[in-house]
Image: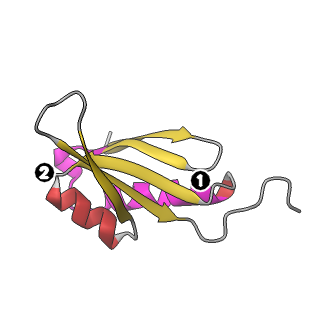
Amino acid sequence: MAGLAVVERHANHVMLFSIAVSPDFQGAGHGVAMLRWLEDKAREWGKPEMRLYTNARMERNIALYSAFGFQETGRRPNPYRPGWTIVDMTKKVDGAKKVGAI
């Protein structure tokens, strides 16, 4: 397995709960391919937004998400890991189908 993504579908957005690429496959574009897949699924499901959160120490991940179009929407303390900071990010999904639209 090259990688995996754990996704939650909510009423008005898709939450990327976790994404990982095996070390043997990193650097080959699999992470970006999974982000593109998620964006396509969000569009297919009629969700106008994708959301995720990550640790503020994950600077390379934050840079990757930003390059893919995610914007930081806030920072908050991690309630389970004192001293850690969570970074919330969101990306609008263009062309999301309206539920019930023809």
**Looking at the image, what colour scheme do you see?**
secondary structure
| Residue 31 image position (x, y, % from top left) | 33, 56
Q: Amino acid at mark 1?
A: Lys
Look at 42% across and 54% down and name the residue there.
Answer: 34
- Asked if residue 93 is positioned above or below residue 31 in the image, the reply reads below
The quarter of the rendered structure image containing the N terminus is top left
Residue 63 percent coordinates (x, y): 23, 66
Query: Where's residue 79, x and y in %?
Result: 25, 31
The residue furthest right is 102
Which quadrant, please, contains the C terminus? bottom right
Picture disc at residue 41: 1
Amino acid type at circle 2 is: Arg
Q: Is residue 28 left or right of residue 68?
A: left
Mark 2 falls on what kind of element?
loop
Tag shown at residue 94: none
Q: Is tag 2's residue or tag 1's residue first in the polypeptide sequence?
A: 1
Query: Which tag is nearer the camera, tag 2 or tag 1?
Result: 2
Q: Position of residue 2 (x, y in %)?
A: 31, 45
Q: Residue at x 15, y 59 (%)?
A: 59
Mark 2 → mark 1, Cα distance in angstroms:
28 Å
| Contact, mark 2 vs mark 1 (Cβ under 8 Å) | no
Apparent side of residue 91 relative to residue 13 in the rendered image (left or right): left
Residue named by callout 2? 57
Q: Residues within 10 Å of mark 2 (few under 14, many from 20)?
A: few
* x 23%, y 43%: residue: 22
SS state under label 1: helix
Q: In this rendered view, identify the residue nearer to me: 81 or 62.
A: 81
Quadrant of residue 69 within the rendered picture:
bottom left
| Label 1: few (<14), some (14–19) or many (≥20) C-alpha neighbours in 10 Å | some
Q: Is residue 100 left or right of residue 21?
A: right
The residue segment tinted magenta is 20-43
Question: Closer to the camera, 70 or 44?
Answer: 70
